Amino acid sequence: MKTLHKKRIALTMLIVLILNLFFLNLSYTVHAADSVMVDKYGRINFTTTSTKATTGIKYKTVGFTITRSTSCSGSQCAPQNGTHGVVRVQQIDEIDNGDGTVTTYFQVPEASVSAALESAGLKDITYGGTIYLSSIFHVVRNNNEDHTDHVDLQSIKNAENWADPNGFRQYYDIPVSYTAKYEVTKIYRTSDGTEIKRGNVDNPNDPDKRWPVGEEINAKLDETVVFNGKTYSLIKSYIQSKHKPNDQDYVQTGTPSSNPKLAQRSFTTYLGGTNVIGVYREGANPVEAIYELEDGTRIKSVDIGEKSIGDPVSHTFEEKVSFQGKQNEIIRSYIIQNEFPNDKKFVQEKGDPNLLTRNTTVGKGGTKFVGVYKPLDGSGGGGGGSCTYEIGAPSKGNILSGSVLDPSANGVLKADDRGSEKFDVSKGIPTSEDLYANVFGKNYLFQNKWANMRGQVTYTVTVKKVYNKTWTIPAVPGNPGTPAKPMSKEVPVQKNVTVIRDYSYWQIDNLEVYKLKNATVKNYALGGYGETVTLNPNGYIAPTLVSDNKTAVEDHVQPQPCNMVDLGTETVSGGSSEPPTPQEDFQPVAEAEVKEVKVKNDHVVFNGTTIMNNAQVEKEAPRPGSIPEPQEIGQNVLYQSGYTVSKTLVNKANQPTTGKIYYDIIPGNINGGSNKEFAINGMNSVTVHTPVVIYAAISDDKAHNQKTVPAPNREATILDRPFTIYMPTSGQHRNILGYGDRDYAKYVRDKQVWFPFDVYSEDKSNFYPKNTWISIPVNQEATTFFMPVWVDEGIHDVLFRTIAENAPPNFTTQPEANLDLAHHVATDVVPVDVIGRVYDFHITDIADFNWESFFRKAKGSSVPTGNSFWVGDKEIDGAARIGANNYILPVRQGSNPLSGLQNIAVKTGYHFSATRYSISA
């Protein structure tokens, strides 16, 4: 017989059904953006209060779309149809309010906010400006989150049958005042990248030294600093976003005296904060000699080098220089200290004894010697009428070349942490785990060609000499006769003598130097980052290049001035007749008059080392050196970790990794060159495989199994009793690095059990109809259910499955573990035997008159005493039976407790009354 009636069962099921239908139509809010603000650190903060541990269908805010202006029109809000940025929220705290609700605190980091503002066209936003936030929603069904982004109003309204779909409009076009303040940091570095010092720029209106975004700031850099006992001078400055530490914006170079903007910087604060970088060089006090005409036209300059302040320096000007085919003579010289560029010191005019050779000490920022020239009156092409020259066109001789334009790039995409990788990504890495990307290449690339230029300068030297010829006409005897007559005659001789002087110098035919820009790495496993990530250099010091290239021969070759040679007068004595005019060779004296030409190379300085020296020398300029071979960058230069494999990615095997490394040409290139990119070949593949296991079990209620022969290999479950299922998330998976026998809860989206019969929750508060997948909390290994009495007895299979977090809607399954990555769900089957019970059998009366007084209140009465002989002393579930009238079978001699009847047994042939209960279906 059944202890629960069908009417009661039907009523219970009806109530459960009505409650389920009612609650499914309710919509709860989980983490909706109730209060949104931007704090002074540039972070977005918001809080929400929601019902704790509710079931049903809910929605939650997972991020925001940021726009410059509103996006709602009519019945639609579509913030991502125009220029926009996107941020994702992060939970930072949660407080239980004690009233069935919880308040959750969320935040978006400043770096994410700033990047989104730039994407939204708000890079130039100023303090107090308005930005518009629109929520990005996910739907949560019975505590299972659907990771589909609903970014526009109609999408979320149509996602479910919400109780109040119009309520979503309040979460779009939320106006938020952007009130971020950021640090502005002055950073001093040497020219080789060594940091000297840093400090934040004081804001008199903010004790935290923070500046409102977009506010104009004036920052003064020190013109000189002392570092390690040495004096360094400012040679370069630039502005930089704290989020882009390799950029150099608004570069200024020179000296503070010649370029006031070098030390006094004015700018507006960047999103995220600003660095003001000053680059300093030891002894950066350049000394040079400048040759110029009276109108300021530069004839040439001579680099004397960089000196320390107070060093003695000297320069001797040439008395005459050639410029544009004319000979010019010096008429004035003076000295300028670069600290005071308009103050001409120690002026010497033509005729002063110190006009040519000038001496001084080096001042702050350097020193200039200035010589002023004017053309000689009537001067011809190069040297006046008495000595002229012509520079012959050079011919190109030897070429010295060097080139490293292949970065030999290589790289890896592996599992964090580098050096102790948790997974062999070529075999498998789960979603939610992190990758690092590491790329290697040369620290710079270059190509150069140095050409040796050779030629001659042809001088025409006028040599003159006067020959005073003397002789005596003999006397003529006779009468009257003539006496001897001395004779003399001056014969001027002038010859133009050709003198050749060779020259040789080196000129830049081609020069290209490239600095490392960044690298990109692409792989399916980086799908959460658009499949491609960019590695910006960290701690990288770019090469420096200074070059000066001149193509005109006059810029390299300087003929030395010469003069007409006057050999004076030579007396040539004859006899009695005029002697012949001597035919003298003037070549030696002309050769002696003409000095070697002065020459100089182009100028190349690489990383502070002079490769091609432009110092002026005689006849043959020095052979240039070579640009050093580049070295491979360090392991931390192009390295970034923490790239999470998105759980939106389904399993895929052997996904190829590709990449590119980029180099930018730096200033100073000559005759060619452009930014370059190179493929990174041979990178390792990545297999995405999210592992799940299910090794399920069900408790065996042996103690309450009344079968004489229990079913083999089946767990006993008893009607009207609880039973426990076990769904651990740990167990054996593939024998590869990071997998094996361990707990895989991290990767589980849901784990579920399926009963082919109805069940209740342990406390009977929830009813689950048969053939329904029931979700079990991932971190809960054991769950107890209650077996209703109406379940059919017999053999049943209980199904289990564990669903990976990256499982697609049309997933496939594999028993116990998804060893084959084509499957995203692990399954298990546990057979059970559903068993009823017979219980509480007891004898309530015996027809033998010797037992009448024991079972009835009086002889001849039908009113029972309540005494019974029970089958045992325990109730159905093993608890001790309570009551004085409980006696234990069998009924035998000695069972009757009445006086005089203790030794009476029941005679054969008498009938008896008994009662039993049963649980069965």
Image: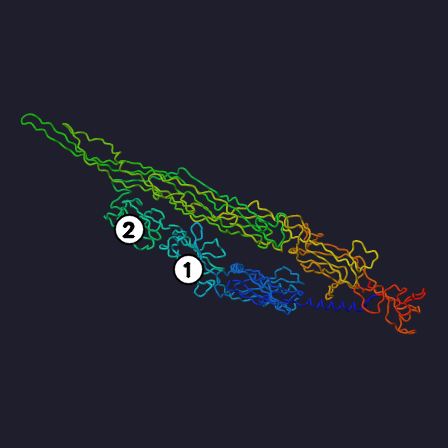
Please name whichever residue, 74 or 211, is drawn nearer the observer in this view of the structure: 211
From the top left corner, tell me how far across and down residue 72 is, in percent: 57, 66
Cα–Cα span, label 1 and label 2? 35 Å
Type of amino acid under label 2: Tyr
Q: Label 1 belongs to which residue?
A: 219
Report the residue that reaches farthest toward the left: 479
Residue 40 showing in the rendered view:
yes
378 up-or-down from 883: above or below: above
Please tell me whether mark 1 sits on a helix, a strand or a loop.
strand
Tell me which corner region of the image, top left, top right, bottom left or bottom right, holds residue 561. Answer: top left
Q: Which mark is residue 17?
A: none
Type of amino acid under label 1: Ala
Of the numbered discs 1 and 2, the one sitting upstream in the chain is: 1
Left/right of residue 197 with respect to residue 577 in the rendered view: right
Please name whichever residue, 558 or 313, is drawn nearer the observer in this view of the structure: 313
Left/right of residue 744 with respect to residue 123 in the rendered view: right
**What crowding class fits label 2: few (fewer than 14 Cα within 10 Å), some (14-19), or many (20 or more)?**
some
Tell me which corner region of the image, top left, top right, bottom left or bottom right, holds residue 704. Answer: bottom right
Q: Label 2 belongs to which residue?
A: 334
Please name whichever residue, 793 or 87, is drawn nearer the observer in this view of the structure: 793
From the top left corner, tell me how far across and down residue 46 is, in percent: 57, 65
Please tell me whether mark 2 sits on a helix, a strand or a loop.
strand
Q: Residue at x 30, y 44 (%)?
A: 325
